Image (cartoon, rainbow, N blue to C red):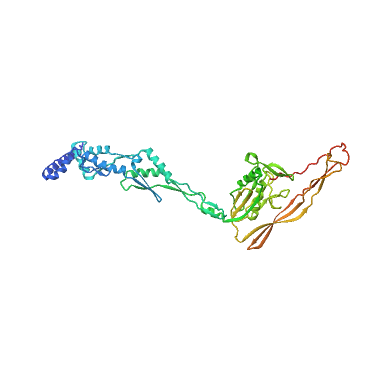
Amino acid sequence: MRIDTSGKRKTILLALIFVAAVAAGMCLGARGAVVAALFDNERICRGVSIDGVSVGDLTVSEARSRLEELVREYEESPISMRCQDAIWRVNPGDLGVRIEFEAALRAAHSLGRSGHFCERIAERASISRSGYNISWTVTVDEQLLRDFVFAMAQQVETAPVDARLVIHDDDRVSIEPDSDGWLLDTVEFINALRKATTSRSPRELEIPVRRMPAKCSTASIEAKGIRRLISAYTTKFDARKTNRVNNIRLGAQKLNNRMLAPGEVMSFNDVVGPRIPERGFMEADIIFDSQLVPGVGGGICQVSTTLYNAALLGLMEPVSRTNHSLPISYVSMGRDAAVSYGSIDLKIKNTTAHYVLIRSYVGSDTVSFKIYGDMPDNMDVSIYTEVVERLEPSTIERVDYLAPPGSVRVESDGKPGYVVSVWRIIKVDGVEARRELISRDRYKPQPKVVVLGPTAAPTATEPEPSLPSIVDPPQG
């Protein structure tokens, strides 16, 4: 059996070193202080540091004084934070930063003071030769830290701003550019703050933010090609007819700021929706069966007519359009567009190569539509109406048995009807380039009605069966 004697040899060796050190210390005089420090129960071993601060050869009280001075610097020296061109500063104490070093002091003082005598001597010699660092404890008040991060988010975060098409009062078109937003990376920011609280001056950090691009960029608005006002049209109404004005205003509002892509078709009825009281529409005069009668939504046809004319002047194509059964007062024949929800619609198509923007305006007694897009500056568009045929009214005689016998009274003078053609004329540099037939419309004549008194006493007769009549849809 082999007996391991290395442990005994090591102990004996350390003891010999110790004896030699004592002897050398006694012989060397001043240098004896080094050896004496190995046996000083009050002082911390040479080579010990706490968080990088040397406390070797110091008493616990001396080491505490040195650390307290440094701790004040750590807790009071502000942290500088930069984000783009702005700088903020915060006192670590406001984050609840506290440095605890008493446990580190106790640990430092305990080094070289445990184990056998020779082991303590060996540990002290090793620390003196190689050094030994003990970290102190840094604590942060979590609630204060998160409150501060939240407050900083209010300072550095910005929402992205979409690019916007701007129509000025003088009809100029410009684009407000987009701008990116910024979002604070709270996790990374908290980690950076923690790290800054344990670093010495200068204590600086870059606030971590993430870029948030705008959803609608300046380039995307520019690509739509809306460069200038290309057409406008205005009609007048009677401001005293408040219900009608209400309906006109409602309808125009629903069409305002509608944008159509190249080739897109817009349905008036789909955009404006049902004209019913629940949606704010009121009762006003409408054309029904060639007569003016009260109906909910009266005035909406003036909105569709005004839009129709602006669309024609803006080189847009009417996909679906119907004239009124009778001529109307606010626009010339052939330039009206009747609508009736569920039966008669106005549909217009953007046939230009760029997007178009529809804007509506309602004044005290006018409704206007303006269309913005792109059209050559030297191009001019006009609408011309040609009366093709005049339709004379017929005469209807009606016997009124309560009227004086043999009397004749004209109840209605009647009005002629018309057949009209509507042309769109396009000029370039003042010279007609082309002429397009837009529509050929028929307006019904209104018969003359004559009321006759009876020529003899009435006799009882069987009533003639009534024939079904064709009734036009109501028109706003």
- Indicate the position of residue 221 as horizontal and vertical percent values: 54, 53
Q: Quadrant of residue 141?
A: top left
Tell me the quadrant of the picture where the C terminus can be found.
top right
**Furthest-left residue in this view:** 27
On the picture, is 116 further left or further right than 475? left
Residue lying furthest right in this view? 456
How many numbered dots are placed on residues in this image? Answer: 0
Residue 240 in the image, given as x and y percentages of width and height? 66, 45
- Viewport quadrant of the N terminus: top left
In this picture, residue 267 sits left or right of residue 72? right
| Residue 199 occupies quadrant | top left
Position of residue 220 in the picture relative to residue 47 (left or right): right
Q: Residue at x 41, y 42 (%)?
A: 151
Pick the front one: 53 or 385: 385
Measured as percent of width and height from the top left, residue 133 is found at 26, 43
Residue 308's spot in the image, x, y percent? 66, 51
Residue 459 vs residue 419, the one in the foreground: 459
Is there any visible trace of residue 5 in the rendered image?
A: no
Q: Residue at x 62, y 51 (%)?
A: 369
Describe residue 79's horizontal placement relative to residue 436 as left or right: left
Whether residue 29 can be seen here? yes
